[in-house]
Image: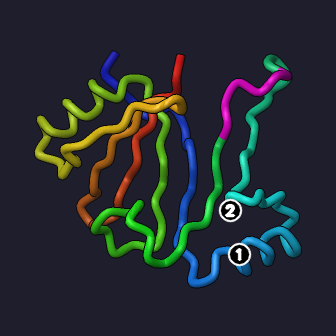
């Protein structure tokens, strides 16, 4: 099977005042915004009552470099089942894939720009 997206790993967006906006989301929508500026939503199903994955929601300062050269104030993180395969496939199709990747305790990360200049983060969770 070719590499594919398996879910949304995170939604990140820039804010003029991340602390104040985080407080607004906490006070008005009930999000449990942590000190680091985000929320972890654990996945659970009746078949798997223990979380087997999560989606991150996080705010970044307006001048954050995490979004690369994208003019968009947001970035979606997609979970993938094979980061290296996905990156190779995107490059073969002529997509604008970042040269760098990152390997950390949280998994493997890579980035690509869509045709409208939106930065996409690809994440292969650790085994």
Q: Position of residue 119 (x, y in %)?
A: 35, 59
Instruction: Point out the residue furthest to the bottom here.
Output: 16
Name the disc covering residue 37, or none. 2
* Looking at the image, residue 95 lies above or below residue 91: below
**Closest to the observer, 6 or 26:** 26
Which residues, given as a range, are shown in magenta? 49-54
- Which residue has dot 1 on it? 19
Instruction: For the residues labelled 1 and 2, say whether their Cβ atoms are less than 8 Å apart.
Output: yes
* Looking at the image, residue 110 lies above or below residue 66: above
Residue 13 found in image quarter = bottom right
SS for callout 1 = helix
Residue in view at x 46 percent, y 32 percent: 104
Residue 3 found in image quarter = top left
Precedes in sequence: disc 1 or disc 2: 1
Horizontally, residue 30 falls left or right of residue 124, namely: right
* Looking at the image, residue 109 lies above or below residue 32: above
Residue 20 found in image quarter = bottom right
Q: Which color scheme does this rendered protein use?
A: rainbow
Q: Sort mark 1 into few (<14), some (14-19) or many (20+) by Cα contacts within 10 Å.
A: some
Name the disc covering residue 34, or none. none
Horizontally, residue 10 falls left or right of residue 85, namely: right
* Looking at the image, residue 7 lies above or below residue 67: above
Horizontally, residue 83 falls left or right of residue 40, namely: left
Residue in view at x 49 percent, y 36 percent: 79
SS for callout 2 = loop
């Amino acid at each position: 099977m070719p590499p594919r997206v398996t879910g949304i790993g995170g939604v990140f967006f820039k804010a003029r005042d991340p602390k104040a906006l985080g407080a607004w989301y906490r006070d008005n929508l009930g999000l449990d915004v942590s000190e680091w500026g985000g929320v972890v939503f654990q996945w659970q199903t009746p078949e798997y009552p223990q979380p087997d994955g999560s989606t991150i929601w996080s705010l970044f300062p307006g001048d954050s470099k995490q979004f690369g050269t994208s003019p968009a104030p947001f970035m979606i993180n997609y979970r993938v089942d094979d980061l290296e395969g996905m990156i190779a496939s995107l490059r073969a199709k002529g997509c604008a894939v970042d040269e760098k990747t990152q390997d950390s305790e949280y998994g493997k990360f890579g980035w690509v720009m869509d045709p409208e200049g939106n930065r996409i983060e690809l994440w292969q969770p650790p085994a």
